[in-house]
Image (cartoon, rainbow, N blue to C red):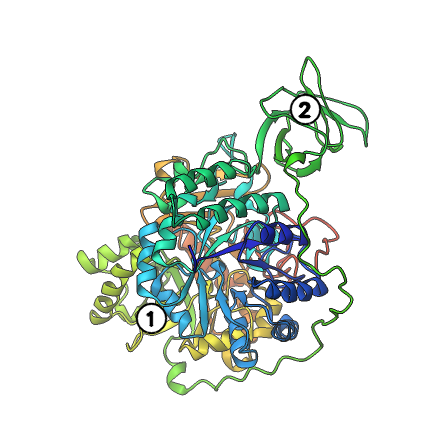
Amino acid sequence: MKGIELLAPAGSPEALDAAINEGADAVYLGLKNFNARLRTSNFAYSQFEGAVRNLHRMGKKIYVTVNTVFEQREADRMYQFLKYLAAIGPDGIIVQDLGVSRMVRQHFPSLKLHASTQMNISSSRGANVLSRQGFSRVVLSRELTLDEIRTIRERTTMELEIFVHGALCVSESGLCLFSSYLGGKSANRGMCTQACRRLYRVNDEPGYYFSPADLQLIDQVPAFADMGIASLKIEGRMKSAEYVGTVVSAYRHLLDNLDGDRERALAEAKAILKHDFARPKTSFYMEAAGPSAWLDPDQAGGTGIPLGKILKVRGAESDRRAMLEKSSVTIEAGDSIRIHKKDDSDRQSHKITFAETTGEGVWISIPDNFDVGDSVYIIQTRTMTKRYPSVLPKDLAPFRRMPGRETAPPVLLPKPQKQEKDLFPEGIYAAVSRIEDLFVLQSVKPVRAMLSYTRAVSRAILEEHTALPFSKNELILVLDPYYPEALDSLLSEEIPQLLASGYRHFVINNMAHLSLFRGTDARLIAGPYLYAFNSWSFAQLHELGLMYKVSPLENNRQNLERTVSDDLRPFTFVTLFAYPALFRIRSDLSSMYQFQSFSDGKEGNFRLLSAPDGTLVIPEQPFSIIDKETFLREAGFRRFILDFSGPPLKKVDYKDVMAALKAGKSLPNTTRFNWKDGFYANPDEGFKKPSSPPAHPRQSQKPRDR
């Protein structure tokens, strides 16, 4: 069938060769910076330039991932990078940061904008908002049903790109803060350490409680083709060339035979996928199945086919060997395996140099630091290896262009008007997620209360007309950052009802929310999940009518000061206290898990909060910089948030926080998150390791640090 694009990952030149030679119509890849897979090899500039030329000669397309947020100090480098890309001419760039999209529209309009799945677009309303901002394609978030995707397709003219195969995140797309919380390795910066794949403990019972199976939507491909989806995307820029080639060949086979015997073609494609050597498969939310269809605590977080545990070891360093039980999988020298320490402290891939089957088992070579009880998975066999014709030119010498050293143009914003200054009073704002918690706030009343707009809150306000302890002028409703298509019909009816009944103040956390308030007199605040990490994104939000903004929870002091000019600081909310939502999961996990507390076996303790709206994972140890309020006021900031949303709020805890705030004292047993140290890595620093291991979480920061 013509018209639908098969889009494959190219994490290396070898994967590029496999993808193209197995029939991909297009590839997506990252260069050495500003992409969401910094831990993969990525492409040198000369390789990229050569790939663009040769792929275009072959009638293929190439997209570049620029799908991370950038800090203010990186504005010049981002500008230089985008100028370079505009000169080379890829077929599109995949973007998360609104600052990047603004820079492109103003200075490099030849670059086509594709909205990354990290942008968390899961509705037609969100897609249409981005269409008006110059985007031509959106990569939909992965937590959608087939019916939702069909509805989105009917309600937007935007090109839609769908992930159909590969690894999944347990958290809603673009909303995971877990890796960043553990040490600044932010998923929004391409440094995710896959916290969902870790071994956790519940009452000393270990399990991979948040490690989802891999996505496989081969069964849904005919439906996607029939409804007019533009592109089917395979995940895997960190996967081997063999994996990429196998998966591409399966989907190519099905797409090429959709006009014939679909049932037979589907069966043949699924047979090919049996050799992708990945995790068990799931269709995720495509079918009406609960989380047990894609979560299995007994399934290790790694990829590959299990070969069992190491039974014996022998040999010294550089010649260490391990014995496994015999299995139905023949193991040979040249095969690749992945080994997991039994305490989940280390995982490594290894190409087997020695393999021997004896009467007691199979002996294979292993790295030095693994031992009895560690688990072994096969991820690639020698017989799978193919040699593909190279896509890159043999001679890369002619391809010498690189980013220059230009300075990004200054970002100019109009000065705030007097009427804008009066929309929200200065002072302390307190956020909660339950109506009963609003009554706790009365013990030490903040200047305004913020209330999460959940389904329970909606019923209480609109149906039950529950009396609230704050007036409508004193209350700000906070909209959830995940906005699936199924929620659109509800919110499109409820927002006008709320406005009609006198509610005027809202925090919006998704691009789709903007459309709900067009033409109204609502007073809006850009929430932390709109990720304003630089003056360019600030300017874009300002252009969209959002003068007031909440700084992202991942932000740090230095970047906050660099980003926000003096005249805008009074309009920027800074969160002083919060239980950050580390995972935001669309499913209610209470149907599967009865526990509320769990740990990572080290210093980290966490809490599981399940509700019909979905599930949150929060840390037991909250984020707090309440002792920095005086400094922040001196720096020109005037509005602050104490965020108690998440766990039920106890009056004694609330009073303790308010008392510490008044006294300017630090709270014990809290973390600074990224406030002092910032992100672990950035494009300027590459993969520089810290001189000493960071605390876990960051518990070692001293109160005197700004």
The residue labelled by disc 2 is 372
- State the separation of the CA atoms marked 2 and 1: 58 Å
Identify the mark nearer the N-term, 2 or 1: 2
Mark 2 Cα-neighbour bin, 10 Å: few <14, some 14–19, many ≥20? some
Q: Residue at x 52, y 54 (%)?
A: 177
Indicate the amino acid at tag 1. Answer: Ser
State left or right for residue 437 relative to residue 65.
left
Could you tell me which secondary element the residue under label 2 belongs to? Answer: loop
Which residue occupies the extreme left position in the image? 464
Foreground pick, 413 / 15 = 15
Could you tell me which secondary element the residue under label 1 belongs to? Answer: helix
Foreground pick, 430 / 667 = 430
Query: Which of the numbered marks, if any, corresponds to residue 622?
Result: none
State left or right for residue 372 relative to residue 423.
right
Rendered location of residue 700, percent (x, y)? 64, 51
Rendered location of residue 146, percent (x, y)? 34, 50
Q: Residue at x 38, y 35 (%)?
A: 594
User: How many marks do you count on the picture?
Assistant: 2
Can the viewer see residue 698 in this picture?
no
Rendered location of residue 635, percent (x, y)? 57, 75
Which quarter of the rendering shows the C terminus? bottom right
Query: Which of the numbered marks, if any, corresponds to residue 515?
Result: 1
Which quarter of the rendering shows the N terminus? bottom left
State left or right for residue 353 relative to residue 556.
right
